[in-house]
Image (tube, coloured by chain):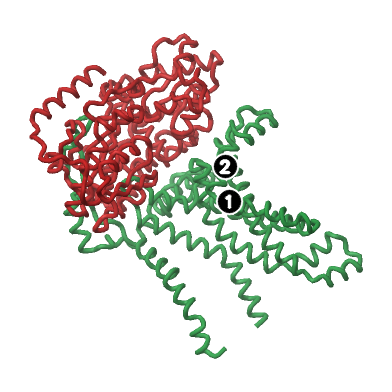
Chain colours: A green, B red
Amino acid sequence: MPHRAFFWFILPSATAMLLFIALPIGSVAVQSLFVEHPRVIVEVENCGPFGCEIESVVDTEATEALRREKPLGRFNGFGTYINRNHLAFAELGELWRESSGAREFLDAALSLPFYKALSFTLAYTFLVTPLVILLGFMIALAVNALPRLIKGPVIFASLLPFIITPLIGSLVLFWMIDANGILGASLQRLLDAPDLSLKASAGLTWLVLFVYGVWHSAPFAFIVFYAGLQTVPQDTLESAMIDGAGAWSRVWYVVVPHLAPLVVFVALIQLMDNFRVFEPIVGFSASANATSLSWIIFNDLRSEGVQLFGSAAATSMLTLVGVAVLIAPVLARTWRDFQRKG
Amino acid sequence: MKTLTATLALIGAVTLALSTTPAHAACPVSNGSVRILGNDFPAIQAVAAGAESCAANAEFSKNLTSEHLAIAVEALTVNPAQYTTQIIANSSIVALLNEGLIRPLDNYIADSDQFFKNTQLISIDGEVMAIAFMANAQHLFYREDILREAGITAPPATYEEVLAAARRIKDLGILEYPVGGTYKAGWNLGEEFVNMYFGYGGELFKSGSAEPNINNSTGEATLAMMQRLALFMNPDFLTHDSNAIQAEFEAGNIALANLWGSRAAAVTDNEGSTPAIAGAIKFAGAPTVGGGDIPATTMWWDGFTVAKNISDEDARATFDALAHGASAEIANANSDAAVWLTDGFQPGPAAGGVLASAEAGARPYPMLPYIGLLHTALGNELVEFMQGRETAKQALRDVEAAYTAAAKEAGFLQ
């Protein structure tokens, strides 16, 4: 394609990407470098139904004047990134000096909000992603082997977990695993453990969230692989059969290599999605045991009375860096393949 | 309770005597626009409906949602503001005050034909910025039948007695987990800390500053008491909010809890429970703790404001419509929905716990610009202590550190 035609061809998408992706990211990046002006606080007497108290209020006029001068706030550089609620460099250094061993250091570090969230986010991403691919592939193979008559209904039913809004799906499961819920009560009976609670311990909460993640995303992998299965060359399969290859060998040597590009695609999407895990933490009221990077952003924006935009922006940028690091190997591989073909 | 009612009546009478004759009959509002933003629960629905009936000839719209706080500041910052009023509580008015988004109401009150008791007027530095119409507080809910079965005749008046009662109920095998608590990680857990800390006589901030003041022996005593209570709670307690505790009560799983007064009518109606259980649930003021003399709870109010960035005509219409919405007429028609502060409201039995707590001198939840940041830090950083994975000292240090980082970013601390 001549350069000129190429330019006009991609101009609309490039403009849209600039407007809706690059600009917002740029604005968040700028925001993360600023903090609010010092607020002018004055003490006044407040009265209400339960008596009067001397309390502080913000002098809005004085604060407003500061804001008009510099609407973005005070420049703070990377101060927000390294404070205690994010990368916590100073706190980590202090812990390192104080702690007697690596284990103690790790325990203390993982109770810092950012690292606590990062540990769950990474565990979720690296466990749920491969399991989703595996389970999705198995469902696709199973459904593909079904007689035509029942295929449609089965496909529809298998897609349901993906269709249900994540928050609703997790809430439904949350009530089912309650000690009074159908799953929670059945597990207590089956395991003969009347005190078993899937919500109380960190380990079991994590497990429940992983199971939910796989349950929710497996249909996505399934439908992609199922579509891929329809394009597997029948000639190759037949010749493999004639050569005496069993069912497993056919899957392993013919079907899997054929679907490899789809595996890369599903892995890419799932890595990005799972790294942003958020809804199940809210749905399962799991923030006592599991927080994620997205959950921290939400928490910063929902603080009553004061919204921490700089803090939320810093965590967003760190999430972006995380996603970039995660998908870099996959992208590098795709690029190499592209170069080889080119 | 009698003295409180008498005091309120006296204040009311004095205010009435001092106030001037109203200048005009406000209702129905004939011009201007009334646009309400507020939380979504029965009392606020009643107020909004009352305002709507008054604004039948004016432009009227309402958005009642539990997510109102998420949009309030932006919606009232634009000029003209998207809503002419937000119905707020003592915690959420702070966001509007911090940004200067609401207007003083003194002139409207002087001109109104509605009567407001002095105790309804929320005055900040001498200017009335909101009018409170209902009170709320967490207070003791208890199962009279279960306490009697355990040989306890009077409801516990202190948290030490709550622990003793819980121990008896558990030892007698009546209930496995006799105590319920709204200890859900996040806002609820932070609120329980504030309740208990005030009961021990603590101050959340160093006097006259935004410096936190919880990492001390009072804070440690507070956490120790919360942990001892948690031993008698269902192990899932860190996921329990008011909805869950209401359900636990209705299911007959718990006998004692410090629950919101606004739930009193809901647990005793016969929906979601059996008449035997619902009939045995009684209310008392919040218990005291550690020999303190005020109840370990915080008092809350809900009230209405008028936005600053609107025309004077709309502000007048909004004030008049909401003054009608929060009038005694509406309050008495919805007497079970809330503990109304309105003059002439006759409180029912469900209001007993809130009124008893207020009369015993429970402190209001602080209206401080930076309180939300400390509340959030408490709700997140106390979790590991409640799970037994951290010492009280460590947890309190974490709260102060998390709060300090956030307060510096928000410009409250240097």
Quote the CA–CA distance across marks 2 and 1.
10 Å
Q: Which circle's residue, 2 or 1, is located before the other in the chain? A: 1
Q: In the image shown, does B49 or B284 lie closer to the viewer?
A: B49
Q: What label sits on residue A342 in the rendered view? A: none
Instruction: Judge left or right: residue B117 versus residue A231.
Output: left
The label number, if any, that marks residue A172 in the structure image: 2
Figure check: A95 above or below B263: below
For residue A236, side relative to residue A301 (left or right): right
Does residue A67 appear left or right of residue A275 in this picture?
A: left
Residue at position x 56%, y 62% in the image: A326
Q: Quadrant of the C terminus of chain A?
A: bottom right
The chain to which mark 1 is attached is A
**Percent coordinates x, y for residue B381 in the rendering:** 42, 41
Which one is in front, B302 or B211?
A: B302
Mark 1 lies on a secondary structure that is loop
Mark 2 and mark 1 residues within 8 Å of each other at the beta carbon: yes
x and y, in percent, of residue B325 in the image: 27, 38
Q: Position of residue B393 (x, y in %)?
A: 39, 35
The kind of residue on which mark 1 rests is Ile
Q: Which residue is mark 1?
A: A164
